[in-house]
Image (tube, grey):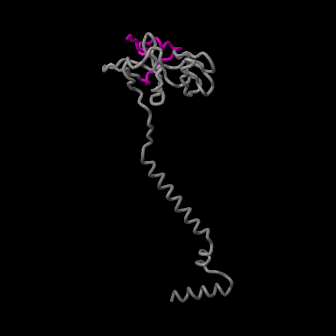
């Protein structure tokens, strides 16, 4: 009976030049597009909810690390092998060792060691630093920072970047900012 009434309503709507609700909705592609958009939005919300359950983890290099034995370094040498991995240069002079942090004191760029010119040069704004870390050209307002450097129990040099020593605050006079060594 209900089916007969539905056919009668369809026939009446068609006879009067109209369409029924089913034909109306089926004739417009935007309905399909709306359902696809709705499903996509629900999927996005579900994915965001799942992502919320996982922690944000930042992988940074360790702040304390060993760089090798004192005999591995030559006098007057700047070791650049730790620049990319740990963010320090290890410098050996006649008196001993110190570790310079590879962050320009102007705007935080990473200077390069220019062995031919015997200086650190920042590629961003041209600041120049002597081998000691003292600034002598460019906009850098102060010298490079030093990290704590000690001799570990196993005889290797240990660097701790969590302890920083600033020249202008007298930090370079601290015994932990310099490792005296004579071969």
Taking 29 as reference, is 43 above or below it?
above
Quarter of the rendering occupied by the C terminus: top left
Residue that sits furthest to the left in the current view: 154
Of residues 126 and 15, the one nearer the viewer is 126
For residue 66, side relative to residue 47 (left or right): left
Residue that sits furthest to the right in the current view: 17
Please report the residue visible at 38 percent of the width from the left and 20 percent of the height from the top: 157
Horizontal and vertical percent for residue 179? 41, 14
Please report the residue visible at 59 percent of the width from the left and 69 percent of the height from the top: 31
Taking 13 as reference, is 166 above or below it?
above
For residue 22, side relative to residue 79 (left or right): right
Please report the residue visible at 50 percent of the width from the left and 59 percent of the height from the top: 42
Residue numbers of the magenta segment? 160-183
Horizontal and vertical percent for residue 39? 52, 62
For residue 20, side relative to residue 175 (left or right): right
Q: Quadrant of residue 85?
A: top left
Horizontal and vertical percent for residue 112? 55, 25
Residue 165: say if magenta.
yes
Please report the residue visible at 47 percent of the width from the left and 22 percent of the height from the top: 89
């Amino acid at each position: 009976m209900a089916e007969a009434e539905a056919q009668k309503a369809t026939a009446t709507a068609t006879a009067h030049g109209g369409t029924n609700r089913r034909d109306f909705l089926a004739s417009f592609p935007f309905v399909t597009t709306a359902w696809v958009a709705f499903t996509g939005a629900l999927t996005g919300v579900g994915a965001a909810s799942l992502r919320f359950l996982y922690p944000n983890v930042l992988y940074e290099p360790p702040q304390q690390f060993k760089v090798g034995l004192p005999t591995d370094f030559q006098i007057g040498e700047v070791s650049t092998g730790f620049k990319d991995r740990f963010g320090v240069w290890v410098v050996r002079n006649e008196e001993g060792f110190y570790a310079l942090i590879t962050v320009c004191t102007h705007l935080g760029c990473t200077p390069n060691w220019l062995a031919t010119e015997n200086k650190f040069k920042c590629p961003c704004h041209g600041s120049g630093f002597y081998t000691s870390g003292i600034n002598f050209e460019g906009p850098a307002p102060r010298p490079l920072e030093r990290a704590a450097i000690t001799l570990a129990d196993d005889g290797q040099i240990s660097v701790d970047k969590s302890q920083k020593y600033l020249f202008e605050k007298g930090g370079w006079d601290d015994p932990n900012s310099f490792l005296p060594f004579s071969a």
